[in-house]
Amino acid sequence: MAMKYVQTTCPYCGTGCSMNLVVNDGKVVGVAPYQRSPVNEGKLCPKGVYAHEFINSEDRLTTPLIKKDGKFVEASWDEAYDLIAQKLKSYKPSELAVLASARVSNEENYAIMKFARGALKTTHIDHCARLCHSSSVAGLATTFGSGAMTNSIADIAESKCIFIIGSNTFEQHPLIGRSVARARKNGAKLIYADPRLTATGKQADLYMQFRSGTDVAIFNAMMQEIIKNGWEDKEFIEKRCVEYETLKGEVMKPEYSLENVEKISGIPAAQLKQAAEWYATSGASSLLFSMGITQHTTGVDNVKSTANLAMLTGNIGRPGTGVNPLRGQNNVQGACDMGCLPVVFTGYQKVIDEAAHKKFADAWGFPDGICAPQNGYEVTIMMKTLADNPGELKGMYIMGENPMLSDANLTHVKHAMEQLEFLVVQDIFLTETAEMADVVLPATCYAEKDGCQTSTERRVQRFRKAQDPPGQAKVDWQIIAEVAAKMGYAEQFAWQSSEDIFKEITSLTPSYGGMSYERINKPEALQWPCPAADHPGTPILHTTAFAPAMPDSKGLMTAIPFKYPAEVPDAEYPFILTTGRSLFHWHTGGMTRRSESLDSEVPTGWIEINVDDAKELGIADNEMIIAKTRRGQINVPARVTKDIMKGVMFMPFHFVECAANILTNDALDPVSKIPEFKACAVTVEKIQEA
Ligand SMILES: Nc1nc2c(c(=O)[nH]1)N[C@H]1C(S)=C(S)[C@@H](COP(=O)(O)OP(=O)(O)OC[C@H]3O[C@@H](n4cnc5c(=O)[nH]c(N)nc54)[C@H](O)[C@@H]3O)O[C@H]1N2
Ligand SMILES: Nc1nc2c(c(=O)[nH]1)N[C@H]1C(S)=C(S)[C@@H](COP(=O)(O)OP(=O)(O)OC[C@H]3O[C@@H](n4cnc5c(=O)[nH]c(N)nc54)[C@H](O)[C@@H]3O)O[C@H]1N2
Ligand code: SF4
Ligand SMILES: [Mo]
């Protein structure tokens, strides 16, 4: 067979780079550049370059597995479906919970959302967006009326000043980093705030190092300085915002003076002043953030603070400005858009809204109705319910997530998952979570199916099938449709192709209403909102007014008092532990640890310790040590570095052999229900030789 190229979209991060898969003899053997996408113009980061390596791994799941007497036994699809249908039908809707996936297509997320609410009739559906940008969605929805990135990736290059806080853009969104680098080449100033001098920080004109969990104090200090100097945008505030006096009342308090916030955060007053001036007076400032902002018990407060700063200085709605939460997973934006959240159907139509509920119930036509018009549980609340209220939740269906490594406080998560009577996991590998399942279903990966996904800049782009799936593995939406058919709902899931599903999505989702495969097949695809077939899509949000969801379409400024993280250092646990990522690995490692080129770069985990702290503790670089928190302890190699703030330690969470989430705190933000992955109290000890 001849060699061919199949154009598709990268399956890793939310940047949404396009690439070609190189197919030889029916198998994907490589990745080649695809030049015509405006997002990445043929460039890729290492994960994109090696995105073919895990596809044909020896240990892909190839057949359904059923657990018998504690051991997995291979089963036919029919046996697996019969068991699942019989079990799921034996529970009440409120006893069932579903996790969708930011790794799979819009069509597959829509299918599982319809399955949860229509076939299982449960309100409990969520996915990893909870652990990620739930704070952005909640925070920006109440301030701007929409939780998405306001500007586009290319637009960042138009900026005169870029303020990056809590995002390691050059490693976690490398091709967005390229836009940042372009802006700098054109003279823009880059301000970077992070407890670690990361690869992104090394590009900065002003680097502010600070203690994890002090973000609100930093924002309030910058705003106080801006108001004191008259740098606020009075016209913008007057015309487009409400509650300025409330905001001012808070940020002008003496506790947010530069000197006091220097004490709280560790950032020298002069740096805070410089940052305030550059951001407020550049003419077009863009703010980029990610997990350093959202993953806190004050995550929503942090996000609202980013919005406050942008509104105060009129940096919204124009090229080179905006508040830009960089979405993480390839399709986390899409999984949210598809209604895989406990409160909304597709396009953020509220489940509790009677008209929306009726619209979906009527369109779907389940003879026995759909879920109640009520909000369901978030994934973090599902785990707490399992542990604290045994018997309330009994069955769970997980597609493409690995909470047994990605959730906070893993000992608690394991205990919670053990309470389940019945667990189905649909994945491409036998993950830590799949190990706990009663039934495991083999799914296809991105290279084996058609569909589309939505990037961080709301760009809806295609996946294209390049090879056949291994063994008996099936496409995710097809598996869900077949389970539904076994439960008596063949008619509601009678799709023949992913395009059929996309048509159903666009007919029910106003922001996707004008899209079709024909239109998104173009190299530049389409950015939502795209409400009509002749609408060109929307690169920049809020240009003349905020979203109609806001009263008078005005932006809401809010007073945000500073609060410390749920757990702060003390005599027993004297350091702050923060967690995050490496350039070469992806989350729980399923794909990247099976990619030789990536895994050989970074074969295991580590804990970053400041040189002075290490000296005081007598810990050497590369020494194996014990890291311990109130929730557990692990052995992990030390990486002694001057690039991390004294008093703060950092661990990536990719590695099962030194799993950071054994240590992390599952205290939640009261609104977004996100755990505090970015700050808890830790101690480290030398391993005593026997
Ligand atoms: N290579 C790679 N790329 C990825 C991913 C991956 O696993 N690997 N995952 C994707 C996903 S799903 C996501 S959500 C994004 C995440 O992308 P990022 O948010 O950029 O990644 P993180 O490493 O989690 O955290 C970012 C930074 O927050 C800093 N930080 C720690 N504590 C605090 C704090 O209290 N305040 C502030 N302001 N900053 C703090 C950390 O030092 C870190 O540099 O990356 C996406 N891209
Ligand atoms: N300590 C700490 N923990 C964190 C974070 C942190 O910063 N610190 N970040 C959090 C964030 S932002 C996120 S997004 C979460 C991510 O948490 P998860 O989503 O649980 O992590 P992944 O490893 O990406 O899991 C995705 C799973 O999908 C499977 N998969 C891939 N493609 C397909 C497919 O096509 N079909 C199916 N069915 N399965 C597929 C993969 O094999 C993998 O098992 O982790 C969170 N956890
Ligand atoms: S930047 Fe993100 S989308 Fe682009 S190649 Fe790298 S991982 Fe893939
Ligand atoms: Mo994420």
Image (tube, grey):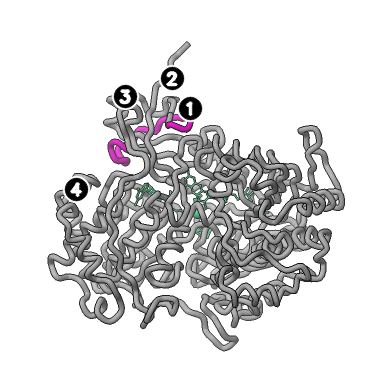
Contact (CB < 8 A) between labels 1 and 4? Answer: no
In the image, what residue occupies the spot 69% across and 39% down? 435
Residue 476 seen in render: yes
Contact (CB < 8 A) between labels 2 and 4? Answer: no
Name the mark nearer the viewer: 2 or 4: 4
Q: How many angstroms separate mark 1 from mark 2 (CA)? A: 8 Å
Total labels drawn: 4
Task: Give the residue number, with chain letter if any, for mark 4.
Answer: 262
Circle 1 — which element? strand
Q: Earlier in the sequence, mark 1 or mark 2?
A: 1
Q: Please state if 214 lies on the left or on the right of 47 as rendered.
A: left
The amino acid marked with disc number 2 is Ile
Q: Earlier in the sequence, mark 1 or mark 4?
A: 4
Task: Give the residue number, with chain letter if any, for mark 3.
Answer: 617
Please give the range of residues in magenta. Answer: 630-648
Task: Give the residue number, with chain letter if any, for mark 2.
Answer: 687
Tag of residue 635: 1
Q: Earlier in the sequence, mark 2 or mark 4?
A: 4
